[in-house]
Image (spheres, rainbow, N blue to C red):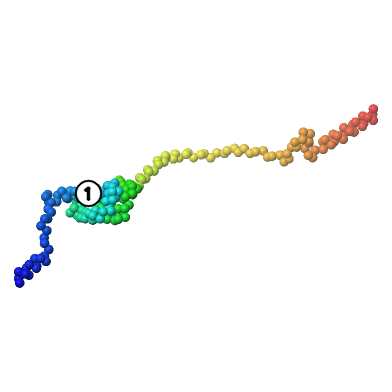
Amino acid sequence: MASTKESDNASNTPSSPKNVYKDPDDGRQRFLLELEFVQCLANPTYIHYLAQNRYFEDEAFIGYLKYLQYWQRPEYIKFIMYPHCLYFLELLQNASFRNAMAHPVNKELAHRQQFFFWKNYRNNRLKFILPKPPPEPVVAPAPLPPAAVPPQVAMPPVPASTIAMTTASPAPSSALSPMPYSLPPGSALAKNDMRNSGIDRRKRKKEV
């Protein structure tokens, strides 16, 4: 009875594989190949090549991309020289991104964005790493020295003296007439002369 039970238990236990693959170099060659492939994903042109050749339509290849996510672990990430490959590896887990990278326009867009990131990354990072210098104190301008005022010379006192004041002659009470033969008003000399001359003429006529 015991022998039959042992034979049944032996038949129920799964048989261990006899031929187990073992890397001849303890996985060094596999490590290097996978590291090289993962870092190739940092190039948008290479991703576009994979999409154009329909690698992303193979389920085995999609499973291989999921398997390569172990490179994001701290013990493996230290071997990565191009960290953009891990970013693209994460995006390749999305089917819409894999389909979009088959178009050349999207490939160029990803390449431009990557270039701008490399161009401005250092300056943007230094803004947060380097301490900001303290603001420079505002120095007030030095006050100008007061202007030298020349000493005022005391003027000698003016002696009291009588100053002749010239007064204008009073204006005539009546202004002269602009007529050349006019006479001053109130003068009867002209009237008398005219009468006397007329009388003299009459007397002369009578005498003659």
Q: Is residue 153 above or below residue 40?
A: above
Question: Residue 89: x and y, percent?
Answer: 25, 53
Question: Residue 30: x and y, percent?
Answer: 16, 50
Q: Which residue is mark 1?
A: 37
Q: Which residue is outermost to the left?
A: 2
Q: Is residue 7 above or below residue 122?
A: below
Residue beneath the point at 75% across and 37% down: 177
Q: Which residue is outermost to the bottom?
A: 1
Q: Count of labels shown?
A: 1
Going by the image, does 60 lie left or right of 103?
Answer: left
Residue beneath the point at 57% across and 38% down: 163
Question: Residue 142: x and y, percent?
Answer: 35, 45
For the C terminus, which image quadrant?
Answer: top right
Going by the image, does 127 lie left or right of 145?
Answer: left
Residue flagged by tag 1: what amino acid is it? Phe
Secondary structure of residue under mark 1: helix
Question: Residue 1: x and y, percent?
Answer: 5, 72
Can I make out residue 133 in this image? Answer: no
Can I make out residue 53 in this image? Answer: yes
Q: Nearer the viewer, residue 139 or 59?
A: 59
Residue count near mark 1 (Cα–Cα under 10 Å), binned few <14, some 14–19, many ≥20? few
Residue beneath the point at 71% across and 39% down: 172
